[in-house]
Image (cartoon, rainbow, N blue to C red):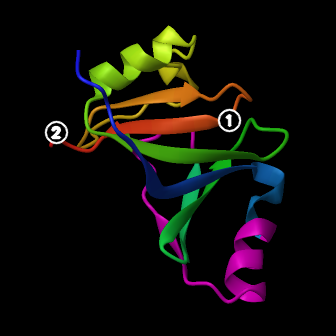
Amino acid sequence: MSKPEFTAGLNIAMKIPKAQYEATVAFYRDTLGFDVEEDDVSYAPTVSRTHSVRFGPNTLWLDCVDNYSQPDLWLQLHTDDLDAAASKLADIGIHPCDEVEPLENLESRTHWIKNPAGVIHLLAESGRS
């Protein structure tokens, strides 16, 4: 079995309850002056609206999740071999939890995982080296 490499992704998702969504978007756009654009969310059925924010070299996704009661922060990881990465993570008890947000029509193979503290990460295969 190959040894997978992991690298940080450029996407960070802030999952925001509907009641706090507009004020949060306004904070980044109006108060901080960041470039904020509304984007399509058809690929993520649990998200009702999303805005992207240029956040230095990263993109911060402000996702409105209607049934959330508190905000949550999600991170992105890349790997060169998704199968080997999933196997390595399973060895320490970390298994895919793709049910947290089904994704459709993506360009790469992915799994959602949770780190030991419960923070969700999108693990995306970035292509084999």
What range is drawn magenta here? 23-47
- Of residues 33 and 5, the one nearer the viewer is 5
Number of residues whose C-alpha sits closer than 10 Å to that of mark 1, classed few (under 14), some (14–19) or many (20 or more): few
At label 1, the amino acid type is: Val
Number of marks in picture: 2
Number of residues whose C-alpha sits closer than 10 Å to that of mark 2, classed few (under 14), some (14–19) or many (20 or more): few
Query: Pointer 1: what residue?
Result: 119
Q: Residue, x 48% and y 12% (percent of image)? A: 90
Q: Is residue 46 magenta?
A: yes
Q: Is residue 34 magenta?
A: yes
Q: Tell whether 121 sits left or right of 41.
A: right
Question: Which of marks 2 and 1 precedes in the sequence?
Answer: 1
- Of residues 70 and 22, the one nearer the viewer is 70
Relative to 113, does residue 108 appear above or below in the rendering?
A: below
Q: Residue, x 61% and y 35% (percent of image)? A: 120
Q: Residue, x 26% and y 44% (percent of image)? A: 126
Relative to 94, does residue 52 appear above or below in the rendering?
A: below
- Of residues 119 and 43, the one nearer the viewer is 119
Relative to 35, does residue 76 appear above or below in the rendering?
A: above
Q: Secondary structure at mark 2?
A: loop
